[in-house]
Image (cartoon, grey):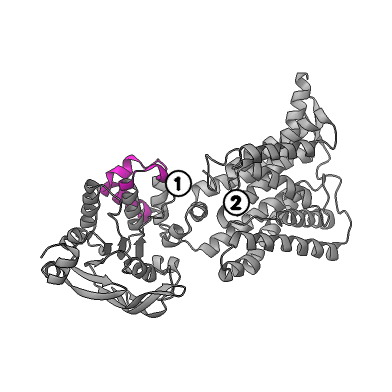
Amino acid sequence: MLAVKNLQAGYDCLQVLWDVSLAVEEGEFVALIGSNGAGKTTTLRAVAGLIKPAAGEIFFLGRNISGLPAHLISRLGLSFITEDLNLFEAMTVRENLLLGAYSQRDDRKVHTSLDFILNLFPILLERRNQLAGTLSGGERRMLALGRGMMGTPRLLMVDEPSLGLAPKMVMAVFEALKVLHGQGVTILLVEQNVNNTLHLADKAYVLEHGRIVLQGASAALLEDPYLKETYLGRR
Amino acid sequence: MDLSIIQNLLVTGLLRGGLYALMSVGLALVFGVMNICHFAHGEYYVIGAYVAYFAYALFGLNPILAILVAAAASFLAGAITEKLLFYPLRKFNKGEWVMNAFLLTAGLSTVLQSIFRLSFGMKYMGIIQYWDATVSIFGMNIAVDRVVAFGIALVAIGGLWLFLRRTRTGRAIRAVSQDERGAQLAGIDLNWIQTLTFALGSMLAGLGGASLLSLSPAYPFAGNKPLIASWFVVTIAGLGNVEGAIVGGLLVGVFESVSYYLLGQGWQDVASLVLLILLLLFKPAGLFGTRVKSVWE
């Protein structure tokens, strides 16, 4: 579904990614893990079209999308939920969700998605007429997830959904991702919360200093001595 | 001050304020969505006035039709300006967007004024009136033109409100003003929204120029006064705040007619500027600046 080949990218004269390659197949739950500044967010930004890759290719549904503007990539069915969520703070929860289905012109389909999301996140149903800016941290994540799902995307890329949340909310967010995956949504998740993530994902890539250093099935990675020592603090 | 005088001041003030609101809403929209301090806004008012003049006085169109043609022409002029000037600027601009865009509008204003001057000469092109009638409000006889102009301003602002609130594209405009990246990721084409916004803002200005043609004739520099007035309003209301611009426009209209009455002709501008200075000193974000941040909230 998504294939990133030898991607090099960065900001102005600072190159962050060196030769990153990864693949996400239909229906998979893939994680991209690594420490702060490893280039995880940059990878997602390049795939979503927010920054232009310096070199390499990105294929989505068999189409080369590298260099395509972000709104066209989004319309192809690739949804990116950023770390800072980019909610429309002065609009209601409902309006935010409706904007998530901006490219869908069929009103009936929009309302089907809306019902589905409000059903999946009952808290959003409760708060649907409240301004997004007034929500709590956890509710904002739920709203961003819901908005990202409104266009019934083929692939959902989520950047650090657990960042800054209380442990209880972290679990709720992971639970929501699990439900979405159970319903057949393909997910590419970026996380620093390595232990939780590996228990959720089918396979994972480990990014260090802009390079993929380790990859494989989550179960195998959990047993990997290097990963255990570096990221899980166990021997 | 007896009651009838208060009523008179209120009516003349509101009629004047309707135009201010119309102009200021366009200005606030352009600033709120595109971050452009638009100093060529008055020139679109003039385009509206010229087109209405030609449509009505030369081609003998029905007044309402002439005003609609003028609105369409200024919408188109705005769209072309955006595609020709601001789109390339956005593409190649490196930092300092607000300053560069402001300078571009300042230059654009001079260029457009010169084009008007070359094409139509330094003369007033006006009409006596669209409708030869007056109506009586609180015992005052008021030209139908003024009342219709006020009505047009209200309808246009109300229409814009519905558009921004209730339609998919209107929501997208507000989304861009609140979070450009979020809008892009939702599949919204920023370039299209920005062109549309600029065109809508220009259309509101053109509508003002066209509907007030009998009171202020088309003239190469006719845009200066409404430009300053609408900047005054948005500064008072808080930049980029569309809702505040409506209330602010009406308030300033009433304020001007009251100070005109109390202080005498020529002093109303002094009173307005004093008010502006006081406001900037004590409430620099504008009257509604703290409560509301974006286009229509």
Q: Quadrant of residue A231?
A: bottom left
Q: Which residue is drawn at the image coordinates 56% and 65% (left, top)? A: B95
B48 sits to left or right of B30: right
Picture coordinates of residue B163, whole percent (x, y): 54, 49
Chain letter of the residue beneath label 2 in the structure image: B
Picture coordinates of residue A166, whole percent (x, y): 26, 47
What number is the disc on residue B29?
2
Element class at badge 2:
helix
- Residue position for label 1: A91
Instruction: Decide which of B157, A193 is in the foreground and name it.
Output: A193
Asked if residue A126 lies in the magenta stretch, the reply is: yes
Q: In which quarter of the image is residue A158?
A: bottom left
Picture coordinates of residue B272, whole percent (x, y): 74, 38
What number is the disc on residue A41?
none
The rendered magenta stretch, by its main secondary structure, is classed as helix
Q: Which amino acid does label 2 sit on?
A: Leu
Where is A34 relative to B280, above or below?
Answer: below
Disc 2 residue crowd, few under 14, some 14–19, many 20+, Cα 10 Å: many
Instruction: Decide which of A139, B195 is in the foreground and name it.
Output: A139
A140 sits to left or right of B245: left
